[in-house]
Image (cartoon, grey):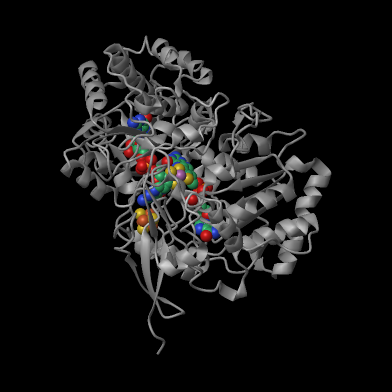
């Protein structure tokens, strides 16, 4: 009998990077347990970590290159597959130009450092400007705020929640999500600790979320009105002379312009828009300003909405004018072992933003990627630059992008589509060629992105635990091999581990952190809490933090003229929600995660349901401009009247995900609208979609 061995690594599913202790016998996982010694996660894990083993052994997993033949897929060899991919990509580009090949990257790439390090080479080899990713379904407003205020898209303020005394959360549900742009595993426990040291937590959300339940105060808010609230908080603080710039006094510019900008945004004006009382807004502003350490944090609900960039700007500005930017217990900047910001420094280089605009509807491009909202029209609209071929890597836009079914229809009109993925799913089933990816336990692990967003500096590296199935190459090798085939190079570059070693040697902790040191540590190493460091890192042309960038001031008239998106035809606002036992669209094939009742329900306030004759558990038809879906109602006064919530990530309709575990669910993105965007950033406005409800 093989003996039990222990393997340490961080989980790669969500942003939380929980430390895991995996017992195995060399061939199979015996158990997956939390690493109580992990300095960041301190023993937290969630049920998804245990499912890491399922993704490896999933009977529906793609383990051989698959070529479309009629409606079916047939297995082919690797050489044939790479040749076919290179040949078809080049054929499309020689007929229609380099931009005719589109690329879409999904969320799992951000956790796969082999992909992160090798995809740029593939982009270069393909040479198309038509690139997309889940980032514009997620977080571009944060990057745009950082670009204009701080000069670098990845210089990201992270709430120092372990030392703050006042936490204001808008549009995030970290008790379920474990944080985003704020890697904070075990958020519930961190909230308890915050309150135990005398701190306060206020949550602003149209749903009384699991996070709101654990907070001191919760205010319902009308969807898409957070910018009114945040700017009114700034208004009160400046009006009452409660502002302080703290140690950033000589590093900040634009306070007077900010004062002028918020002059009309009185608590009364914000109360009218948000539904939160003017007195509540005043006392929130005073309490926030007077707290010794306070931090405002706004996420999905306040960034994937029509005023996402204004929200991120106002959040940063609020933290700055209360002396809580780059300060202990406020919004701080990480110094990770792998210095992602330094790696991509733009100091001394003139840049203009947006970098480019999309061909059909002129939406902005940031960080080299167009908004996913325009992917369908770029595939459908003829002319020079039309997308005729598409490569997806670990992405499922049919279920995750706004009006995903329009993308699906457009996929069927492509000359060629290929995917690097682990499943035949709603997106990849349209591919002519699928190349199998490797799953977490078969890969080395260093989270190069999320250490940059973590509430504490730590680092961890793990070698692959198991070999890929069928003698398959590592996913990064597939990417590198395709790039080499396209450029005619006769070999691929250095391994990710070699590149990682170089990057760590150039990082903030080069004296203590290296690949061997991390391997020796057997788990994560602690690199301490965040430290003030912003002044030296600002990359704005004048080296100052700009509190009132013109691009944002120019967007204020749009905010001020904003009425309610709801209408007589569509009297409800739809928002999304996340659930502990699913991650985006791709974990719903794990029996242990999907077992139990159907969690894909529409949450409705009982008064709204009563008026419409909708009973708890009964089927409801939800309709919007782009489509309609039918799903069970869940009546709850956790929902603000007039707002309804559907979880994201469901609606798998493909035949391959195992029938035994499949519950009948719907995709929220059959209702979301690709024409609803935040125009400054081009980010999808998933939240606040006007819909109608009727008993089915
Ligand atoms: N309405 C609404 N829509 C949303 C959201 C919302 O809140 N509301 N959230 C948005 C957000 S924040 C995000 S990040 C996006 C996510 O959008 P996507 O990234 O497009 O979607 P995922 O569900 O993460 O899809 C991951 C894909 O990668 C595959 N995969 C999983 N593991 C691996 C692997 O190891 N290798 C390879 N090659 N493939 C793998 C899966 O099979 C799946 O096809 O969705 C967005 N969509
Ligand atoms: N379990 C689990 N964890 C995850 C994921 C998952 O799918 N499952 N996905 C991961 C990913 S990719 C991401 S990006 C993060 C996202 O993590 P979070 O940002 O925490 O995202 P959500 O849980 O969707 O929370 C969004 C909240 O915004 C509220 N909301 C909607 N509209 C508005 C509005 O206009 N104003 C305000 N104030 N609130 C609004 C919604 O009711 C909801 O409570 O989670 C990550 N973690
Ligand atoms: S919270 Fe996220 S990182 Fe932690 S175990 Fe769950 S899925 Fe993995
Ligand atoms: Mo995300």
Residue 604 percent across, percent down from the top left: 28, 36
Residue 401 percent across, percent down from the top left: 52, 41
Image quadrant for the N terminus? Answer: bottom left
- Using the image, determine if residue 452 lies above or below residue 275: below
Question: Left or right of 267: which side holds 358?
Answer: right
Residue 591 percent across, percent down from the top left: 38, 64
Q: Nearer the viewer, residue 624 or 121?
A: 121
Question: Left or right of 693: which side holds 450?
Answer: right
Q: Is residue 694 visible?
A: no
Image quadrant for the C terminus? Answer: top left
Q: Is residue 13 visible?
A: yes
Residue 205 falls in image quadrant: top left
Q: Residue furthest bottom?
A: 1
Q: Nearer the viewer, residue 533 or 693?
A: 533
Q: Nearer the viewer, residue 101 or 681?
A: 681
Q: Residue at x 23, y 18 (%)?
A: 282
- Using the image, determine if residue 115 lies above or below residue 438: above
Q: Residue at x 16, y 44 (%)?
A: 196
- Using the image, determine if residue 315 lies above or below residue 592: above
Q: Nearer the viewer, residue 220 or 338?
A: 338
Question: Left or right of 362: which side holds 245?
Answer: left
Residue 430 percent across, percent down from the top left: 62, 53
- Using the image, determine if residue 360 lies above or below residue 399: above
Q: Residue furthest right?
A: 94
Number of residue marks: 0
Q: Residue at x 63, y 38 (%)?
A: 368
């Amino acid at each position: 009998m093989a003996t039990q061995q222990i393997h340490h690594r961080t989980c790669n599913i969500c942003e939380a990077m929980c430390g895991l202790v995996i017992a195995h016998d060399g061939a199979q996982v015996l158990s997956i347990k939390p690493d109580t010694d992990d300095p960041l996660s301190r023993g937290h894990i969630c049920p998804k970590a245990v499912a890491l083993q399922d993704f490896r052994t999933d009977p529906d997993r793609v383990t051989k290159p698959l070529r479309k033949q009629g409606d079916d897929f047939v297995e082919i060899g690797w050489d044939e597959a790479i040749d076919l991919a290179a040949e078809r990509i080049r054929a499309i580009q020689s007929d229609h130009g380099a931009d005719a090949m589109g690329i879409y990257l999904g969320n799992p790439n951000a956790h796969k450092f082999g992909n992160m390090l090798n995809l740029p080479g593939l982009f270069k080899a393909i040479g198309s400007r038509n690139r997309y990713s889940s980032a514009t379904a997620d977080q571009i407003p944060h990057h745009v705020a950082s670009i204009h205020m701080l000069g670098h898209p990845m210089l990201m303020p992270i709430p120092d929640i372990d030392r703050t005394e006042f936490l204001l959360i808008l549009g995030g549900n970290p008790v379920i999500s474990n944080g985003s742009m704020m890697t904070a595993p075990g958020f519930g426990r961190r909230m308890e600790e915050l309150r135990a040291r005398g701190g306060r937590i206020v949550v602003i959300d149209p749903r009384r979320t699991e996070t709101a339940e654990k907070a001191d105060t919760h205010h319902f808010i009308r969807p898409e009105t957070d910018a009114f609230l945040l700017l009114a908080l700034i208004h009160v603080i400046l009006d009452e002379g409660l502002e302080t710039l703290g140690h950033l006094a000589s590093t900040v510019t634009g306070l007077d312009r900010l004062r002028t900008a918020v002059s009309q945004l009185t608590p009364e004006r914000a109360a009218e828009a948000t539904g939160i009382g003017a007195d509540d807004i005043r006392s929130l502003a005073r309490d926030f300003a007077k707290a010794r350490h306070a931090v405002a944090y706004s996420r999905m609900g306040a960034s994937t909405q029509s005023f996402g960039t204004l929200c991120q700007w106002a959040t940063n500005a609020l933290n700055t004018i209360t002396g809580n930017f780059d300060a202990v217990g406020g919004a701080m900047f990480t110094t990770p072992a792998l210095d992602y910001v330094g790696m991509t420094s733009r100091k001394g280089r003139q840049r203009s933003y947006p970098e480019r605009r999309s061909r059909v509807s002129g939406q902005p491009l940031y960080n080299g990627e167009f908004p996913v909202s325009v992917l369908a029209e770029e595939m459908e609209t003829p002319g020079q630059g039309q997308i005729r071929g598409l490569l997806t890597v670990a992405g499922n836009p049919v279920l995750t992008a706004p009006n995903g079914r329009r993308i699906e229809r457009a996929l069927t009109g492509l000359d060629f589509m290929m995917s690097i993925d682990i499943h035949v799913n709603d997106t990849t089933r349209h591919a002519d060629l699928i190349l199998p990816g490797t799953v977490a336990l078969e890969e080395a692990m260093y989270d190069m992105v999320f250490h940059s967003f973590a509430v504490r500096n730590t680092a961890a590296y793990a070698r692959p635990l198991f070999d890929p199935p069928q003698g398959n190459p590592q996913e990064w090798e597939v990417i590198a091999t395709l790039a080499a085939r396209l450029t005619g190079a006769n070999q691929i570059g250095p391994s990710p581990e070699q590149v990682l070693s170089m990057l760590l040697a150039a990082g903030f902790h080069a004296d203590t952190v290296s690949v061997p040191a991390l391997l020796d540590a057997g788990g994560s190493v602690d690199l301490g809490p965040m430290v003030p460091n912003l002044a030296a890192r600002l990359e704005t042309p004048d080296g100052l933090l700009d509190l009132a960038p013109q691009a944002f001031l120019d967007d204020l008239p749009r905010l001020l003229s904003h009425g309610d998106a709801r209408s007589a035809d569509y009297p409800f606002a739809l928002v999304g929600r996340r659930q502990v036992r699913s991650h985006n669209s791709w974990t719903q094939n794990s029996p242990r995660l999907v077992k139990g009742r159907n969690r894909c329900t529409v949450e409705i306030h009982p008064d709204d349901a009563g008026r419409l004759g909708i009973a708890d558990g009964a089927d409801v038809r939800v309709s919007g401009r782009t489509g309609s879906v039918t799903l069970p109602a869940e009546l709850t006064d956790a929902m603000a009247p007039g707002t309804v919530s559907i979880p994201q990530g469901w609606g798998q309709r493909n035949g391959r995900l195992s029938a035994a575990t499949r519950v009948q669910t719907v995709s929220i993105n059959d209702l979301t609208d690709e024409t609803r965007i935040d125009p400054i950033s081009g980010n999808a406005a998933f939240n606040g979609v006007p819909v109608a409800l009727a008993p089915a």
